[in-house]
Structures are given as structure tokens and as C-alpha cells.
Image: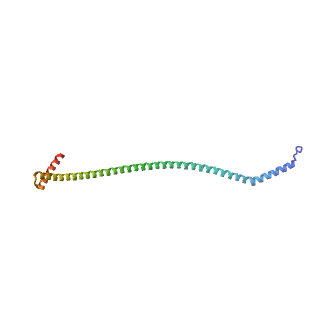
Amino acid sequence: MAELGFHLPSLIVYLVNFGILFAALYFIGYKRILAILDQRSDRIRESLEESDKVRSEATQARQDLEAQLGESRKAGQQVLEEARQAAERYREEEQEKARAEAEEFLRRARAQIEQERNQAIEKVREQFAELAISAAERVIDRSLDRDAHRDLIEKALSDSAEAQRN
């Protein structure tokens, strides 16, 4: 071996030194390095588990949010439908009130017209009675008893009014 450039006693010393160094590093550093690597792999595994957990929670939260959004949409549409129905009922009630007010106005107007017509007929009767008495006085050329003739004329007018109604 000397021909190859190896010196056997040096080689043995090197091997013993390497063995001692290896044993010292194994007992002193290797266990610590393995413990640190194990801790690091545990932290990485925990981080991966935590990220999976957060991802699943986020997915669940998104699904819950979408479900709540759907419910909110339904509730909003229900509120809109109720508001539309309330507006329709209000519109119908207002139309009914307007109709009732119009009918009441027409009824009052008709009653007033009837009253004014009756007053006009009464005035015409009075004027006609006066004209008839004046005419009769001129024709007879003497004064007639106005009250007696008025009663006769009123009776004639009522009889003719009843005949017209029937």
C-alpha cells in the first residue's frame, strides 16, 4: 500500500479519529439535528393541517354565506311582494273612497237640483196663480176674492201635476 501512497498507521489513525469524531457528532449533534428536523416536519405538517382546516372552514363559510344570501334574496323578494300587495290594497281602498265620495257628491247634487227644481216649480205656480187672478180680474173687471181663487188654482195645478206623474 505504500506503493499507492497510503501509509497504514496514518490510515488507522485517520479512521480512529473519524470514528471518534463521528461518535461525538452522533451523540452530541445528530440527535439534536434530528429533533430539530422532527420539530420542523411537525410544524410543517401542523401548518398543512391548519391550512386544510382553514380552507375547509372558508369553503363552509362561503357555502353558509351563499345560503344566507339566498335566504336574504327570498326575504327581500317576499318583502317586495308584500309591499306591492300593500300598495295594491291602498290603491284599491283609495279608489273605493274616491268612488264613494263621487257618489255622495252626485247624491247631494241631485238632491240640491231636485230642491231647486221644486222651488222653481213653486215660484212658477205662484206667478201663474197671480197671473191667472190678474187675468180673471181684468176679464170680469171686478175684484175677485184672491184667496178663494188661489185655492181653486192650486187645486187645479195639483190635479194636473198628479195627472202628469201618472
Q: Is residue 19 visible?
A: yes
- 19 displayed left or right of 161: right
Image quadrant in which the C terminus is located: top left
Q: Residue at x 59, y 50 (%)?
A: 54
- 45 displayed left or right of 69: right
Where is residue 52 drawn, in percent x and y? 60, 49
Who is closer to the viewer here, 106 or 4? Answer: 106
Where is residue 27 drawn, in percent x and y? 75, 54
Q: Residue at x 22, y 52 (%)?
A: 120
Who is closer to the viewer here, 84 or 77? Answer: 84
Q: How is the image coloured?
A: rainbow
Where is residue 37 drawn, in percent x and y? 70, 51
Q: Residue at x 84, y 49 (%)?
A: 12
Q: Residue at x 83, y 50 (%)?
A: 14
**Total numbered labels:** 0
Q: Quadrant of residue 142?
A: bottom left
- 10 displayed left or right of 42: right
Who is closer to the viewer here, 127 or 141? Answer: 141
Image quadrant in which the N terminus is located: top right
- 145 displayed left or right of 122: left
Q: Is residue 64 visible?
A: no
